[in-house]
Image (spheres, helix red, strand yellow):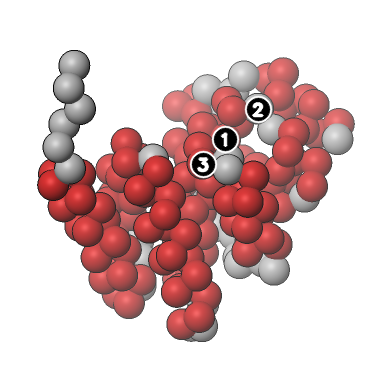
Amino acid sequence: MDTVHLLNHLNVDGAKVVNKPHWVTLLVGLIRSDMGLGGLTPHNWHLLEELVLTGNLTISPDEADQKVMSSLKKAGEWEKLGVWMLVVWLLLAGDTDAKSMEGVAEVTQELLSKQPLILPGYESLYKRGWLHNLYKVKLEQICQAQAEQLHLEPSPLL
């Protein structure tokens, strides 16, 4: 709790972070704990997103990753889930379990349908070549389907 409290009051600027992999490890470790999952401020979630999208993920998958994903989805925490799923896709690189990928793909599809503005972050994951080819292809399919859906839906009247 002390670490979460301290981080919530620091207001760290991602552009000025020196040891980015250490910060990612710290934030992910806290999110995997009950205190961090519910206790970190939106600023810290955005910091994690910024750091992850610069390719600074040096952690390994953990049993808690699926629990975090499920908890955020169940609570309807779509903004936090958007950040967490970026982490999960990068963690999949070392996982060869097709069932894990299917669950992640389903949650990602639902997430992107509810939060279409986050699509560019997901597109950057497969475009930058950070994913194993199997996962790259799957995420690209999900993103393309969402992009097509966005173009097919009529614009709301202003």
Q: Is residue 12 left or right of residue 146?
A: right
| Horizontal and vertical percent position of residue 151 | 13, 44
Q: What residue type is disc 1 on?
A: Trp
- Is residue 45 visible in the rendered image? The answer is yes
Q: Quadrant of residue 45?
A: top right
Residue that label 3 marks? 78
- Image point 68% across, 20% down: which residue? 10
Horizontal side of 151 relative to 20 (left or right) equals: left
Q: Residues within 10 Å of mark 1 (few under 14, many from 20)?
A: many
Position above or below: 135 against 40: below
Left or right, 127 with respect to 130, comes to left
Mark 2 and mark 1: span between their CA atoms?
7 Å
Q: Quadrant of the N terminus?
A: top right
Along the line of sight, the residue nearer the viewer: 66 or 89 = 66
Whole-angstrom CA distance, mark 3 to mark 2, is 14 Å
Front residue of this view, candidates 147 and 129: 147
Q: Which mark, by number, is residue 45?
A: 1
Whole-percent x, y for residue 97 in the image? 51, 83
Q: Residue under circle 2?
A: 41
Mark 2: secondary structure: loop
Q: Is 127 situated above or below 95?
A: above
Q: In this rendered view, identify the residue nearer to me: 7 or 58.
A: 7
Q: Is residue 148 left or right of residue 135?
A: left
At x 45%, y 74%, the residue is 102
What is the three-letter code of the residue carrying label 3?
A: Trp
Of label 1 and label 3, which has the lower sequence position?
A: 1
Q: Are marks 2 and 1 in contact (CB under 8 Å)?
A: yes
Per the model, the C-alpha gap separating discs 1 and 3 is 12 Å
Question: Could you tell me the amino acid type at mark 2?
Answer: Thr
Residue drawn at the location 35% of the way across and 71% of the way down: 135
